[in-house]
Amino acid sequence: MNYLDLSAEAFLLVPLATIIIYNICPKKLSEKYFYVFAAAVAIIQIIASVSMFYLMNVLHMREHNFIFLKVLGKSGMGSLCITYFSPVFLFCIGLVSFASVMIAMHTIDAKKTHYVNLLMTLITGMNGMILVKDLFSLYVFLEIVGLSSFVMIAMFQSKKGLEGSVKYLVMSEFASIFILTALALIFMQTGSLSYDAVGSFLLDGAASSQKMMIYFSVILLISAFAIKTGAVPFHSWLPDAHQSADTAISVLLSGIVIKIAGVYSLIVLTRLFSGIEAVHVTLATIGILSIVTGALLAAKQNHFKRIIAYSSVSQMGYILLGLSTGTTLGLIGSVAHVFSHAVFKTTLFTNAGALHEHFESLDINEMGGLQSRMPVTAFSSIIAFLSTAGIPPFTGFWSKLLIVMALWTSGNPVMAGAALTASIFTSAYFLRLQKKVFFGPLPDRLSEVKEVTGSIKFIEILLTAVTITVGVLFPMILVYLQNAGTI
Amino acid sequence: MEILDLKIIMLIAGLMMIVAGCYCIIRTYHMVKIIIGIEVAMKAVTMFIIMGGYMNGHMGLAQSYVVTAIVIEVIVAVVLAGVTMNLYKKYGNMDIRNLIQLKG
Amino acid sequence: METIIFISLLFLLVFCIMAVMSHSLLKSAIYLGFASATLGIIMYVLGAKWAAVIEVSVCSGLVTVIFISAISLSSMKKDQIQRHYNDKKRMAYLPITLIVAGVILVVVALTTDFTVTGSAVGIAEDFREVLWNERQIDVLGQIVAILVGGIAVDVLFRSGQFK
């Protein structure tokens, strides 16, 4: 067994094994050191994805097929595949999970064992979605991700948590019904749902005689995945669910779940149905709508988490715009934006966790002038905001640049212009947020506020460092991509 | 092409069932009724998959899809029932009109 | 064979509509059970014997869950429930919606040509072999999903200390 297979197997094996080991441990131990288990899984995931990325690039592999748990028999537990952009997603899963665990050390007092178990199933579900090469298995793991998220939101049985969970659940059920209907329609034609079979069927002339059915299934699939992404007009559940959950769980939902459940599925869809022009047009329309609507709605909110949740809607729009080009450059831009969004959105939610220590309601009208009292939180929040707005040299700038370049080169200068103009909205709502929370005079009643300590401070510093370092080093990545011939 | 074709009739009936299920989810105020709406729509989907297997001959594959889908459908129902139970404890009934805490 | 399927389809549709329209949860659950049994017949006739058995047995369990939650959790009287949720009135437009949808679908079916390219000749596939030899990853997914369900029961159904 070589290193490549070893890293590939780790993605599913480690979280599954951790569930077993964690629940065998004595209750006292597992309650006290819950973060050790969870953080270990996240760190192993980060190491495995980085080594995967490095090895695949050294060996010039576009994709790596492997058989999960080959020791069990000839076909093991199913054959899986890692494509050239998958390690980025896997890395984001590890990073955001790590941040979530660090926040959970501060915020979660009860039900620690449940938190770890659900986090492990969530990671298993997300890794499974990335690794499978079959539409039906994609659906199965999508449901695992969804189910873990519903239970995590409702976990503390607060009124708000239950409400957010119900809204997410009902919308997700529509998505499930749509996906299964579309899959059944495709299955009638192809007799198999593996990516290869569906792709070759669509390339075949046979598909042209069944245009109606194909279009119908594509519409259903796009709406289902748009629901999961939280794109406009299906965004209503997203702010509610993300606001009502505990901060350690909001980080996961906003930082990674919408990207894996929504964006990755859409990437699979665009790769399979690349021949249909309507897919690209629809994605572009949804993207522009999401950018503008999300930003306008974010400017109206007063709840800190709700603002950044609506900001997620807006940023998902950029990712969809990148995908709508259908080119490799657009795909790379989208994946890069997935990475930068994961980093800066996690930073912002960590800030929400830090502010939550002093402000139970997280209403931004209660805050003000906190820059002097919470310097680390303020600094990391400003860096994250600059990255969101696309100011160089932070990561958000480069990924947005790639998306705009992709739109321009694929003959959509209008879309590129619109995407650039919409950045102004992003600056608008974030300037309002920063002004109300961190700048201005410090009210007397807030003079007792202290900077957050321990793991939350650590994760704020770490994520800010990632934003700055990757942003500064990004030109090298661009040069590398150019040498590799992808741009 | 004659209209009384088996697969066309089944497709139409199934799509009508999905419409009925979705209508139920949208219109009802009762949490348990939402579960019933989801179940109705899922029945149609199950029928579609089996029908696909019957039409292209891969019945074994279709059955394994259906079994997986049923397992997931049941777990979704269990989670929804759990949330419903908790809502009942909080509010004393299962009316989704109670859910107005989050807005803006 | 086609006659049985047509009759079962009709019953299935009627049971589903009744389940949606009825304001009593118990009646809804019973109609859902009937619908499941009818679907089981259709699946059996089409040749999906294993899936039919699983569908019927699982749905009976599900109907029991709905029964229990409906009986144990309803403090309201029957007429109170009717007035409170007013399901009959809110579902009143369902038949019209369905008729419109049916007409549209029939028109669409008449105007487009729907054929299946795959051969309808049955390939001798054993369900168990397919599930265990080709769809292991789905089995893994099922196991994880059942795990999530177990955790959900532990988290949500146990009335414990709240945060």
Image (tube, rainbow, N blue to C red):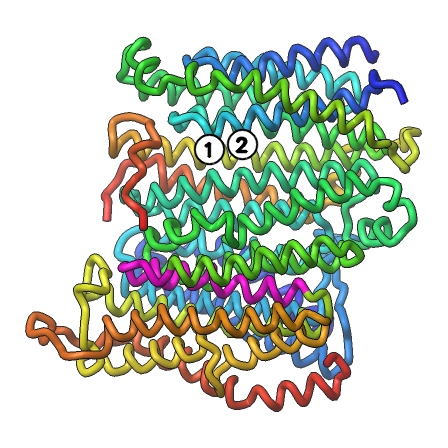
Can residue A387 be seen from the camera position used here?
A: yes
Quarter occupied by residue B17 = top right
Determine which residue is flagged by label 1: B78
* Residue nearer the viewer, B18 or A318: A318
Q: Which mark is residue B74?
A: 2
Residue C29 x/y as whole percent: 49, 16
Q: Is residue A201 magenta?
A: no
Look at the picture and state if C118 lies above or below A435.
above
Badge 2 crowding class, 10 Å Cα cut-off, few under 14, some 14 to 19, many 20 or more, is some
Extent of the magenta region: A298-324
Q: Is residue A41 above or below residue A452?
A: above
Indicate left or right for A162 with C109 as reference: left
Chain of the residue that carries numbered disc 2 in the rendered image? B
Q: What is the CA distance from the residue labelled 2 to the residue labelled 1? A: 6 Å
Query: Measuring 30% from the left and 29% from the top, which residue is drawn there?
Result: B88
Identify the residue at image location x=44%, y=22%.
Answer: C66
Q: Position of residue A198 (x, y in %)?
A: 80, 49
- Residue at x 73% of width, y 62% of height: A81
The amino acid type found where label 2 is placed reads Val
In the figure, is residue A398 to the left or right of A63?
Answer: left
Foreground of the two, A48 or A213: A213
* Dominant secondary structure of the residues highlighted in magenta in the image: helix
Position of the N terminus of chain C, as image quadrant, is top right
Q: Are marks 2 and 1 in contact (CB under 8 Å)?
A: yes
The residue at the far left in this view is: A444
Q: Is residue A248 left or right of residue C12?
A: left
Q: Amino acid at mark 1?
A: Val
